[in-house]
Image (cartoon, coloured by chain):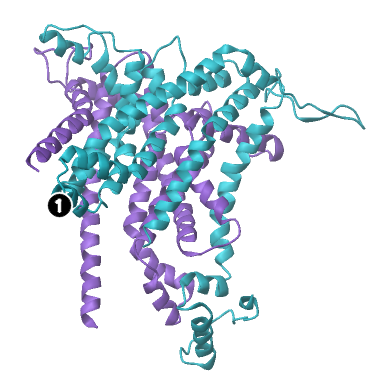
Amino acid sequence: MARSQVRQPQKPPIDAWGAGRLGLIFSLLFRYGPPRWSQYVRKHWAGKRLVIGVPFLWLLMFFAVPFVIVLKLSFSEVRLAMPPYAPLIERVSEMAYAVNVNLGNYAFLLSDPLYASSYIYSVKVAAIATFFCLLVGYPMAYAIARSAPTMRSVWLMLIILPFWTSFLLRVYAWVGLLKTDGLINQALGVLGLGPYTMMYTDFAVYIGIVYSYLPFMILPLYSNLEKHDLTLLEASADLGAGPIKSFLRITLPLSFPGIIAGSLLVFIPSVGEYVIPSLLGRSDQLMIGRVLSDEFFANRDWPVASAVSIAMLLLLVVPIVLFQRYQNRELAGARR
Amino acid sequence: MKSQSWFRRLALFFGFAFLYVPILSMIVFSFNNSRLVTVWDADDSPTLKWYRQLLENEQILGAAWLSIKVAAVTATGAVILGTLAGLVLARFGPFRGRTLLSGMTTAPLVMPEVITGLSLLLLFVFLEQLIGWPQGRGFSTIVIAHVTFAMAYVTVVVQSRLATFDDSLEEAALDLGARPAKVFFRITLPLILPAILSGWLLAFTLSWDDLVISQFVAGPGSTTLPMVVFSKVRLGVSPDINALATIMVTIVGLGVLLSAIWMRRQERRLALEMQMAKADK
């Protein structure tokens, strides 16, 4: 490319109309069209490497490298020592090294039905809770997107406000409501119903997940629904379609990207959820996040805990990649 | 259209009832005299005794102070790193490793916390064996872990803010001979200041609120507030936790309200200045 042949001085001349400057402007104009900041940065700025490098190295060190360690450890053997695992490559004597690659942890995951059942259970709970979240969140997002523009920011702030208060305490609030002698059963008792057992059931976990993750469902849905062209609905009404048909044929298909984004934002973290099932859920059937943490803290079996998290990641890799593609498209789309 | 507005009102009413009734019930019962959290003791309520008990609880106060320190340091670090990453992704155009960087900034948003916690703890253990740092785990390991997941949120906030306006102002400044660093501090930074502020608050809250990751990377001597609350709540409901929740909801409510007002004013000023700049032409 011709780009590399044009070597610009590191420091642009102060005189904006100097020959060098003019030459630079012309070369940029003719070569690349109007100059963009990214091109200036690419050419001039020695600090560019630093600006890219600092966040890059941080994430590499504290996000990427740890996964390599987890992967490595998932092939190790457990030992009664601190740290409680055998190194992959071990020095046995002066000249000999032993390589301890062991697939036993994965074989163990496959052989013990506890793990398979808690994986399936976690995916089931997360999927059902995501569906309920969509059921609650969609009408709210729709109502906010179609309300008066001045009110929208107020509604949105009210949606986000609980998110700023403690997640743990919001889950805890449901304990007082769902208990057998809790407020919901007291209210139902006045009507002559109940009492129902709601605590420590799947139902309580669904409630907890829907409640905690509702903003994550509503915000992407809202930002999608708000952009819709309302003249389409007018056109379909003019052509004789009722509001329900117009919704099903126009609004719903158009909002599909929002539905996908919101559902992924709820589903992915729910699969590994730890706090909600610990406080509200069953004790006879654990979710996979709880299994991982028990394996690590209670059994002190770090290699199996690592294998559990690698297996969980494999399960989530498709939804995570889908989410990233959506996120990138969204951020690129906002430019226009 | 008539039936639609009826439907919208219903959706908003039930939606917000669902969101706020649990919080309101916690606030109401924090003034309840009875130990039984859900039975209203009409004779001796309202009372402030749970607030008194909370303020006398050394363990909770100590944990809260540690959490505040961790959250403040985390938020500051996450804002610096997240702003750099957001700037790089939004403005620097293509470069080698861009895909990896954008992947590493979006993945923590959805990564299950147990995995992040476990992998970071293993890293710290590994590092300690290898280079002798960090010696044991505590404040610094919690902060590093929190910065790593909180900066992802800041990056997204800053990046989407940068995407809402084009780089014509920055280009103009560059054309007039300003160096890129000066352009950043004089033009870009003031424009994204609202995003940076909300990023700071977001990172503070995320850190203040985190239980799972802290449980993995905290040492025996460093117990954060969510860890104390979780161990109390696990044993059943306790009224002083209601009092704690009420205090936090009040502070957060006020904070969000004030920052919303401030940001709205900032937006308006910006819009006004833009208009005036256009009128000058």
Q: Which residue is mark 1?
A: A150
Number of labels in the image equals 1
Q: Is residue B101 left or right of residue B91?
A: right
Residue A201, image x and y in percent?
A: 35, 13
Placement of B266 over or under A113, stated as above or below: below
Quarter of the image where one finds residue A198: top left
Which sits in the foreground, B33 or B158?
Answer: B158
Residue B125, image x and y in percent?
A: 64, 33
Quarter of the image where one finds residue A92: top right
Q: Residue at x 76, y 27 (%)?
A: A101
| Secondary structure of the residue carrying numbered label 1 | helix
Q: Is residue B32 visible?
A: yes
Residue A256, image x and y in percent?
A: 34, 42
Quarter of the figure with the C terminus of chain A: bottom left
Chain shown cyan: that is: A
Which sits in the foreground, B9 or A68?
Answer: B9
Give the colour of chain B: purple
Q: Is residue A31 left or right of residue B190?
A: right
Dot 1: few (<14), some (14–19), or many (≥20) neighbours within 10 Å? few
Q: Residue furthest left?
A: B2
Placement of B201 over or under A176, stated as above or below: below
Q: Is residue B134 visible?
A: no
For disc 1, the chain is A
